[in-house]
Each structure stands twice: as C-alpha cells, then as structure tokens.
Amino acid sequence: MVLKVRKTAAAPLALMVAAGALSACATSGPALAAEASRAPYGVTAAGAPIEIFTLKNDRGMTVKVLSYGGVITQVDVPDRKGEIKNVVLELADLKAYEARANFSSLLGRYANRISNGGFSIDGVRHDLPSGAEGVSSHGGPTGFSTRLWSGAPFERHGEAGVTLAYTAVDGEGGYPGTLKVTVTYTVTRQNALRIDYRATTDKPTVINLSHHAYFNLAGDGNVYDQTAQVLAQTYTPINARKLPTGEIVSVAGTALDLRQPVRLGDRVTADDPQIKFANGFDHNFVVDGGGRGKLVPAVRVADPASGRTLEVATTQPGVQLFTANSFNGSLKTPDGRGLEKGAGLAIETQHFADSPNHANFPSTVLRPGEVFTQTTEFRFGVSR
C-alpha cells in the first residue's frame, strides 16, 4: 500500500529549457501537484523492510530514493522532444544493491579513500578496517551505503522531498564519536534535485559526505558521446594506487583539463599517466570558488543526441568524476541489461580524498558543538 502525504496547490507543467544555460519555461498541459509518497520496496537479507520514496514536483520531474543507503534509483526528466527517461543507473532489485555497496548511494562517514590504515586527531590514532594496502574506501564495509535510514517525506510550495536520518554510534567503522546525520532530498520547482547534508558529533571526528549516483543523460548506452565541463583550474593527482599524492596542480596541458566542454570518449583513453592509473576518470577536481559555504557551479554535462543537460552546483571544495571504469556487464538493470564500462558518470561533490593524512588539504575534522553542512544541486535542463 502506498501512503501519501499532503499535496500542494496545482501548478502548470513545465520543462527545463537551456540555451547555453539552464532555465525553466512553462508549457501548456494538465495541472500537477507536488507529491511525496512512500511504499514497501523489499526486505534485506537480514530481514529489515526497506521503503522507496517517490518525489514529484509540480512540473512532472520524478525522483525515487530508498531508505537503504539513500540509494537514488530514478531521476525521470524530459529530452528536447518531451520524452521522459530515467537518467541514473538502476540495479535490478534490493539484493543487487546489497551485493554492490556504494552504487548510486550515500557515502560516509568518509567518502572516497583514506590511506595508512586510518588517521590521527589531536595525537590520537584511529584505525580503520582497510584492505591489504591499508586503504579504507567510502567508510568501509559498514559505510552509509549499507545502513538503514529512517525517512520523513514532505511537500511544500510545489516541491517534494524526503529527509533521511541515521545515527552512527561511537566507534562504528572505526570512527570516533556518535555522529547524527540527516540528508534531505528535494525535487525543486526548477527541476533540480537538491541534497542537503547535516551532521553533528559528540567527539572530534572526520567527516566527508557525498552521493555516488551514476548519471547517463541518454538514459542507456554509455556516456562517451556526452560532453563534460569541470569548472576547476586545479586537481589532486593520484598515484598507481589511486591515492592522492598530496599535490594540488594545474589541469593545464593534461587530459584533465575540462575547463571547456569535451567529449568524454576523447579523454578516457588519452595517453596521460593520470588517465592510465584510473583506466579513465577517477579524479578529484578543486572547484573554482568552492568550499566557502555558497553554491557555485562545478560541473556541466550535456547529451547532444537527446538535448538533456545537467549542471551540478555545490558548496564543497572538490568534485570527483568517475566514469564507471570497472563495469563489465555483470551488474544488471531491472530489464536485464548489463552495465558495461562507461555506462554512467558519477559526480561526487566532496572534500578531498585522504584529507586526514594531508595537512595541506581542507580540513575534514568535525568537533563537538560544530555543525557539518553541505549542499549540492543537480539541475536538469534541455538544449534546443
């Protein structure tokens, strides 16, 4: 049974239109109302029931979110002809998500990688569950992508959303402090998916929250014919273990220079050591003007064939681009299609990987009495 919460007043249907930028343009059509609903999705292997939240704004955009790991299973938006498609990668069922941690999910307590088997705060060492090379990734085996979140859907002023909440106890995943986290997903009237993160702690800890949704504006196939622009003058290079070297260097003269829109397929096979380390893009860019508490544009993606566009704006200092370099067809969509290399593009707004072990990177330490906040908007549009 689907339980619905209150509805807002009706408003005209609209499609996003872009001509080098994103904007909204109302069109004629039936009046819609914002709607947030919840329904059963499945039961985990441990027997825990999972819900799916369906969020619709008053202009027809739809987003679906799971209480398991905050996974985004659908973002339905139109192309230039008005055809609606899901532009995030979706797995077949809950069992598939349980088997593939971090797929289109929330990331935490620490998104991306931490080296050296852990970190120190105020001279106190904290060991993390790590692989053979001493690397912990995306919060480890008990990261936020594997957790059960409580959800509270809402509707307001033509928008729909859900607030997910989770409390990570002191010592969970090796991290100090009881961390109370809320993540609010809102489908705005401007056809954007806004994600607001908030966290507090009772002991000094480190935190880096993000989301690992894989986007494909075509709705199927790969992303190699799509263009990407990253508004970043510098990036943090990686070594052969895909760990940051600690340097912050210019993108100029490298395959990571995405300051102007480039076709992704022209860069993922570039003869560049950084691209070869990752077998494509798996790099953190330093967002121009990021990390100062205000939303700034970070990434722009466009699909010439469909006309769909995506602009990502964030308050974070960095953004990781990942071109699904390890996909090999073993992951299946609900219709049985195998996801191959390049099937999606993850755009993970974040603090930098391994910041706790690099004093020159922006600090990720959170202390009692402080509040961690982060906002990212995924703004969808259409080019004519």
Image: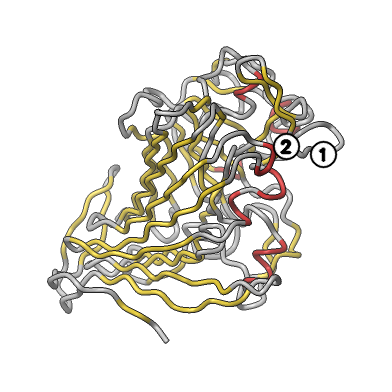
Give residue 338's position: percent from left, percent from top.
Answer: 69, 68
Q: Which secondary structure lies at badge 1? A: loop
Residue ranking furthest to the bottom = 1
- Note whether 178 is above or below 117 in the view shown: below
In this rendering, the answer to whether 384 lies above or below 207 is below
Foreground residue among 241 and 47: 47
Locate residue 96 relative to residue 49 in the image: left or right.
right
- The image shows residue 235 at horizontal and vertical percentages of 56, 23
Label 2 CA crowd tier, 10 Å (few <14, some 14–19, many 20+):
many
Amino acid tagged 1: Gly
> For the image shown, how many numbered marks are present on the structure?
2
Which residue is nearer to you in this view: 50 or 178?
178
Q: Is residue 78 visible?
A: yes
* Residue 95 locus on image (x, y percent): 68, 71
The residue that disc 1 covers is: 131
Taking the image as shown, residue 197 lies to the left or right of residue 111, namely left
Q: Which residue is the site of mark 2? A: 136
The 10 Å Cα crowd at callout 1, few under 14, some 14 to 19, many 20 or more, is few
Residue at image position (36%, 61%) is 162
Give the residue at x 58% y 50%: 144
- Asked if the residue under mark 2 is in contact with the one under mark 1, i.e. CB atoms within 8 Å, the reply is yes
Quadrant where the image shows the C terminus: bottom left
Dot placed on the residue nearer the N-terminal end, 1 or 2: 1
Q: Secondary structure at mark 2?
A: strand
Q: Which residue is painted at 76% across and 33% down in the image?
A: 135
Quarter of the image where one finds residue 279: top right
The colour scheme applied to this rendered structure is: secondary structure
Type of amino acid at the residue the image marks with label 2: Ser
Q: CA distance from mark 1 to mark 2?
A: 7 Å
